[in-house]
Image (spheres, coloured by chain):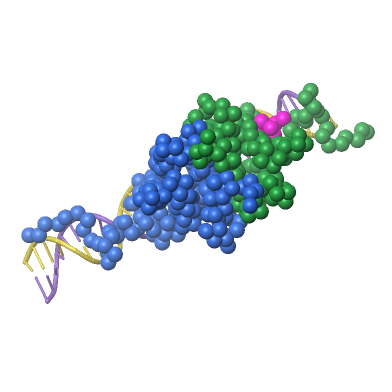
Chain colours: A blue, B green, C yellow, D purple
Amino acid sequence: MTIRTMESSTTSGGRTRREATRQKLYEAAVTLIAEQGFSATTVDEIAERAGVAKGTVYYNFASKSVLFEELLRHGVGLLTASLREAAEDTARGGGNRVDALDAMIRAGLVFIDRYPSFTQLYVAELWRTNRAWQSTLMVVRQEAVAVVEGVLREGVDNGEFSPEIDVQLTAAALVGMVLVAALDWQAFQPERSLDDVHSALSRLLQGRVSGRR
Amino acid sequence: MTIRTMESSTTSGGRTRREATRQKLYEAAVTLIAEQGFSATTVDEIAERAGVAKGTVYYNFASKSVLFEELLRHGVGLLTASLREAAEDTARGGGNRVDALDAMIRAGLVFIDRYPSFTQLYVAELWRTNRAWQSTLMVVRQEAVAVVEGVLREGVDNGEFSPEIDVQLTAAALVGMVLVAALDWQAFQPERSLDDVHSALSRLLQGRVSGRR
DNA sequence: TTTTTTGCACTGACCAGTCAGTTCAAAAAT
DNA sequence: ATTTTTGAACTGACTGGTCAGTGCAAAAAA
């Protein structure tokens, strides 16, 4: 008599069927919620766009809110990993902290370029209060911002940055700069290249706005 | 028979009664929608918080969406006026364009400090698509951003700013910087003073982040 | 008098969540 | 090799509740 382990069947891709379904639901939910907001998006819509029955949503997620929360965790996890990688690569490559910030700006832009809907949705929900997923959101936000703060702090410690800078506020401002510029880019001049946008932000970061040859 | 013009009766303050009611409804709606979002906020809630009957909401506004749209127009109008004033005052006072940008940053912070809920709500709705008030939002957004763009453009024209800067993107980035830093301030370190926040942002604007004595 | 507000009952559309039943591929039995 | 069983995954009609918006007569304000 053969013993059956969990994780029974796998599809050709090696992922369980369940995981594939959840992925489809994430993808459907992210665009709809980005467009309309959480409350205005119905579970029926999500199911329809994902090509599954409504019951399947509830088979895979305890509730609409839980689906959304896991979606947030998943997405911000990707961003944080990407930022961290950019910072570490720069450090390994012998770059200074300004280079690290620059690399993170680029990583942020790449992320937003790849997942514009997620970014939209994230910004829209971030500063709300009194919502079920509020605490989840704060946790993942902090993880991402902490990467930027870390680089700033290292820069202050080794003298690359002025000790007068306010690490927390500056980190928030940098994130905001990238976030809003990128959303603007997507919404109003999507034809521009990432490099183009990146160099405009680099210039701003390095204070090369005031006119000098 | 006396001919009665519009704007009929006025209260002691000189405002019509109707206007006072609408103002109360704006104030009630703005905090509720900032907290919960448009769809999750009910007309009954708005009426209750404003201390009026539900019927009064519909006597004063054609629908929930219309109430919200007029709220947006009203709020962004205040911001735009404030930014414009800051820029003009600087010009009159003989300041250069960097000073003008700095003054606008301060004006932005003052606005956000005074109307945090409105700011929250505005950010949450700005990048949504497929919503009824989308076009209204684009128009008022453009009015506000145009003020910043105007100052940048003047600075480029008279040589204060590098001709290489991308006016549109830089304006968006500056707005984002202030917006996100200010929301962060409100949410996570509300005890800090406006001056404190302002100087941190000034430093970033003038590229005084990299360590120099 | 005219305008504005109130209070409250009502409607109809919409929607989150449920549940009894179906599907099907892998495992077990024969 | 063939048949039977199992159970995870999925389905979609249904339910109970919610909410935008209406209607209206009476009161209050101007």
Location of residue A52 in the rendering, given as x and y in whole percent from the top left corner: 39, 59
Asked if residue A197 is positioned above or below residue B57 in the image, the reply reads: below
Residue B26 magenta-drawn?
A: yes
Location of residue A53 in the rendering, given as x and y in whole percent from the top left corner: 39, 58
- Residue at the far right: name it: B1
Location of residue B167 in the rendering, given as x and y in whole percent from the top left corner: 65, 52
Residue A212 magenta-drawn?
A: no
Q: Quadrant of residue B199?
A: top right
Which residue corresponds to the image point at 77% horizontal and 25% vertical from the top-left? B13
Instruction: Report the front residue among B177 and A96.
Output: A96
Which residue corresponds to the image point at 49% horizontal and 36% vertical from the top-left? A162
Instruction: Report the front residue among A34 and D21.
Output: A34
Q: Is residue B87 left or right of residue C1?
A: left
| Numbered label tally | 0
Q: Which residues are magenta?
A: B20-27
Asked if residue B146 is positioned above or below residue A49 in the image, the reply reads: above
Instruction: Report the front residue among A140 and A83.
Output: A83
Whether residue B110 is visible to the viewer of this picture, yes or no, is yes
Q: Quadrant of the N terminus of chain B?
A: top right
Instruction: Report the front residue among B210 and B169.
Output: B210
Q: Quadrant of residue B99?
A: top right
Which residue corresponds to the image point at 57% horizontal and 45% vertical from the top-left? A207
Location of residue A185 in the rendering, given as x and y in whole percent from the top left corner: 57, 55
Whether residue A75 is visible to the viewer of this picture, yes or no, is no
Asked if residue B106 is positioned above or below residue A10 in the image, the reply reads: above
Q: Quadrant of residue A17?
A: bottom left
Which residue corresponds to the image point at 70% horizontal and 49% vertical from the top-left? B159
Kindly report the secondary structure that dominates the magenta region of the rendered protein. helix
